[in-house]
Image: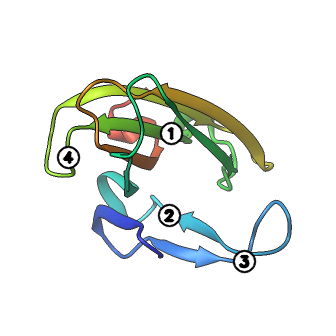
Amino acid sequence: MNEWEWFGIGNDVASLSNDTPSGTGNSADLDIVDALGLPWLAQDVDISSLSVDDVVTLTASVREVRQFQPEFDAWIAAQIFMLESSDSGQILASGFAFFTNPNWESQSFGVTVPPNANVARVLFTPQDPSFGVG
């Protein structure tokens, strides 16, 4: 999926779809029904040409397609983790937005580039109470 990588246990539950807010292009479908653990779709973006205190902004349009079930309500987290490198596990800064709307919803948020950050890891993570989060 063009530089995006799927992380999860179970069936391949990330796919391309033509369901988009504009009716053109593609979107990523993430299906957590057949996944175990906490799956996510991620991409590392090289930000080494940016300066400290620049702001990396993520704008995303997301919709939750599963029908609302109070005992099994899901949401999508969009996140940016600022890292020293793709191999680094230390998060230098982060930002996030949550999406729970069954209709397309657009949100933007920014993260200020901290010292030593060279990679912005962008993640989309479907979450629900069965994962023990939220």
Q: Between marks 3 and 2, how big is the CA–CA gap?
A: 15 Å
Q: Can residue 109 be seen in this snapshot?
A: yes
Q: Residue at x 85, y 71 (%)?
A: 23
Answer with mark 3 or mark 4, whichever residue precedes in sequence: 3
Circles 2 and 1, Cβ within 8 Å, touching? The answer is no
Please identify, in this view, whether the residue under mark 4 or under mark 2 is nearer the observer.
4
Please identify, in this view, whether the residue under mark 1 or under mark 4 is nearer the observer.
4
Q: Residues within 10 Å of mark 3 (few under 14, many from 20)?
A: few
- Disc 3 marks a residue whose amino acid type is Asn
Residue 30: % across, % down: 51, 62
The residue that disc 1 covers is 77
Q: Secondary structure at mark 2?
A: loop
The residue that disc 3 covers is 18
State the quadrant of the C terminus. top left
Q: Between marks 2 and 1, how big is the CA–CA gap?
A: 14 Å
Residue closest to the far right: 22
Answer with mark 2 or mark 1, whichever residue precedes in sequence: 2
Tell me the tag on residue 104: none
